[in-house]
Amino acid sequence: MKTFDAILPALAGILKSYEASIKPYLPLIVNRNVYGCIVLLIDACHEETIDLVSDDSGMRQLTAKICVQLKPHVKEPERLWMFEDNLQLLIDDPRTLKFPLEDNERRLIPEVYVIDRLAQEATWESFSDNTSTGTRVVFYSMKGGVGRSTALAACAWALAESGQRVLVLDLDLESPGLSTSLLPASRQPAYGITDWLVEDLVNNGDAILEQMHASLGTQQRGGELIVVPSHGDNPGEYVSKLGRVWMPGFTADGQRQTWSERLLRMIQQLEEKHQPTIVLIDSRAGIDEVASACVTDLDAKLIYLFALDSLQTWQGYRILFEHWRLHGVATKIRERLRVVGALLPTWGDQAFMQATAQLRENAYLNFSQCLYDEELAGAVLPLADGPFNFDLPDVDAPHSPLAIGWNQGFAAIGSLHERLAASEANQIEFVFGPLIDNLLAVCGAEP
Amino acid sequence: MTTQQAVLDNDAIREAIEACLPADPSASLPDQQLFLPWPHRKALNLDCSLVIGARGVGKTAWARALLANQDHQRTVALPSEIFPYPLTVVAGFSDQAQTSHPSGGIFAKLISAQDDPYSLWLAVLLRALGSDNTSTLPLESWVATFDWVRGHHEEAWAILRQADQALLQENRGLLLVFDALDRVSPDGDWLQVSAAIRALLRLILELKGFKRLHGKVFLRTDQYARGSFTDLPDIAKIRANRIELLWSLTDLHGLLWQCLCNGTPCDAREHFRYWCQDASAKSQDPAMELFKNDLLLLNQSPAEDESSQNIDANHRWELPTAVQRDEPSQRALFEKLAGRRMGRDSRRGVPYTWIVNHLADAQGQTTPRSFLTAIRKAAEESRHRYPDAEYPLFYDGLKLGVQAASSNRINELEEDHPWLPAIMKPFSNRASVPMTVAVFDQELSEAFGLIPADVPGLIERLPKELRSQGVHGLITYLCQLGLLTQMKDERLNMPDIYRIGFKLGRKGGIKPAQRSTPQA
């Protein structure tokens, strides 16, 4: 009896041992359905010629072996193979989410791809490109309670003070709160992101677009802080609304859109309206559907991965990184990632440095093994588009942690707007400086 | 200098950079291009008798600057009033032909005849006292002086005491500077070098008993570590005041602008000077103002007054303080040369830090020699290969610069450690880092047998305490040399400056085949 994780490696092993038999029928698609069962797709042109009956047929033996070994994740032998017209077209279609099959030792099985059908739409691998005119930055954490929203609020504040037009989106829909910490109660707008997503289902989003933000001008150099909360000043029937935001919708011309496509459309409309120089997005924590949309679907230029240096944190990130590697999308996402070391001990320089060094090494381990390119021994020094690979101490590498020390003054998120207003600018700079400098560099402003 | 500068084309800047920086990486910089980082000042003080540093950090440069600094004629690179009284500076050893000390060849010959390096150093010291004090000393040849000293230690000490008294009365002093000590054995006999250094340190320790007789020894970090000098009695007296010449990010960029602003006269150089003044004027860091005041108070600054156009008698143009020390000012300046990106987007790093970081050894140290080599090569490559690039130093040119500095660095290292090429050969073109100790051990054992005993020429060059520790002793030594670091999970890592030159790979989860796989 095989369990889920053993299906693909076992199949890879069998296909390799019957390499000669399967070769004439390639390419092949392994379709893994929502129940975790597989069927194998080959091109319909082979339907007449394939021999699944004769005793000496390699394909028959192969079929039998798969059905025995992959039980109960396969159907009976007669239903293992399916014939698809123009299989190559399906493979070449960029909308087909597929990944190459590999064996236990990460060796590729040529011309064999896996299509994975999930029960929900969060695949952590559907990327949208070039949808943004400004700079979108996602704040993500594997675990909650690491100071992610506080850091976002402080950075938003500091960026606005330095003259940026900052749009803040609270997408932590299931535990909202960022906007209440950034805005005084009197300034909360009537609606929020949840309202828009529900109204959009009946093509009524425009009705609230004007009333879902609050704007705080700063004294400094024309900067502005525009906050879009997850709900309005009166949350209303929030649970009922939340239960509907994930629905796919249909555009006016009848085109189906997933909820993350709808979300992207909302962000584009907000960007068009407010013309921000930078958009900061507070994502939900964990391997969650909203988080998936934030991290991969919103065409963010930069994704901060907040990390406490704990086993649980790295196990979680490892799952994501390994998913990206296996599904062949690591090359798309890795350049956007940056580790943020959260709540680092500040009692003594030594403790801070040690904790940062340990975090750096753990981050390096995971990035290196899943997301960085192998740089072969003796290869010519890569120039512009050489392997994406960094040494452990490289300060510009995605794994290199931007360090945020633990700070009593920013520990409670409750009344951050008062706190920020009262804070000396250099106190914010003291705690969140590395992050703010990095953001300024990303939006191309003078640090 | 007007505020309106004509636009300078990139090639003119590239040519100026090439002309300003030494083509031969080991050549010493002319006086006006020497740059003394703030922490290095202590190395020049009289109470510092031991200055250590890797190859190419400026030991010889400072030894020579001290030697040129006779009595009232101050070397322009040295801070004024660095010494409390007029000083005669004599070369106790150097790689130059000097009458004040035997050449390496003669030194080796004398020692092979009579294994007594201590007496030979004492002879050098006595000769340095001058004829007023040493009428009994035979001077016709080094062998004559050496032979006399070997038989007359007691008289020698009497002469030293007398000379010290005389110097005190005249309110003067004597400083002997010892550099390039590996040359005491022209055929690189390491044991002989180590014995000579040991004898010298003993003499330097004894000089601490005098008031006006001073010695300063410049020593390579690995010579110091390998010599196992810790058992010398009273060595703590020297160790406590020893200075290690390290170069920070801002020190290195300060040096670069010192060189560029004091190079061959040309339009570009005027631009460089103007840029530096401009950067200084824009510098907003209030700490820099405080720092300037500190400098004035201490009266040790080479940049005492920026408004006086920074030109002194020897035509040394002094860098504004901000360009010496202030990171944001330096960043803005370097952007004029290399922009902000190490690739088509910003995700591969910023040139200002990238180049220094990629030249760093395992201890995070970058030598000025590597840095200037890389910048010069980058200018040259940019001029030849990327003439139309947006900035004078194109990012691919900088990468080629690092490559050149890397192979240069490895050549130097192999000169100092002849066993190194053999050790690295089993890994070259095959292995990747990070690597487990087990793999490292296995590769070496297969190639040589017992580590370190079976590696030709290795065991006698290891510091004593590491000789009996097998492969771990070798690993510790390679870490000390800055070639390897041991990660917290104990795997071995190698910084890029050596990894690229030794042709090792770097591990990564995405295999080359997967990179070219068409993606969904």
Image (cartoon, coloured by chain):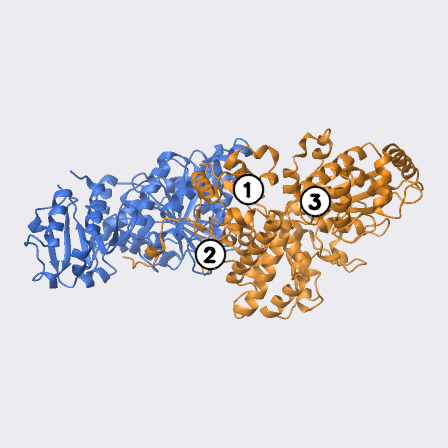
Chain colours: A blue, B orange
Q: Nearer the viewer, residue A193 or B95?
A: B95
Q: Which residue is mark 1?
A: B478
Q: Is residue B292 left or right of residue B100?
A: left
Q: Which residue is mark 3?
A: B40
Question: Image quadrant of residue B159?
Answer: top right
Callout 3: residue from which chain? B
Q: Is residue B324 left or right of residue A398?
A: right
Question: Image quadrant of residue B31?
Answer: bottom right
Q: Which residue: 12% across, 54% down?
A: A59
Three-letter residue code for mark 1: Leu
Dot 2 or dot 1: first in sequence order is: 2
Three-letter residue code for mark 3: His
Q: Which residue is mark 2?
A: B346
SS of the residue under disc 3: helix
Q: Is residue A354 above or below residue A55?
A: above
Q: Nearer the viewer, residue B13 or B320?
A: B13
Q: Which residue: 73% across, 41% down?
A: B42
Mark-to-mark CA distance, 2 and 1: 34 Å
Where does the image place residue B248, in percent across and percent down from the top left?
61, 47
SS of the residue under disc 1: helix
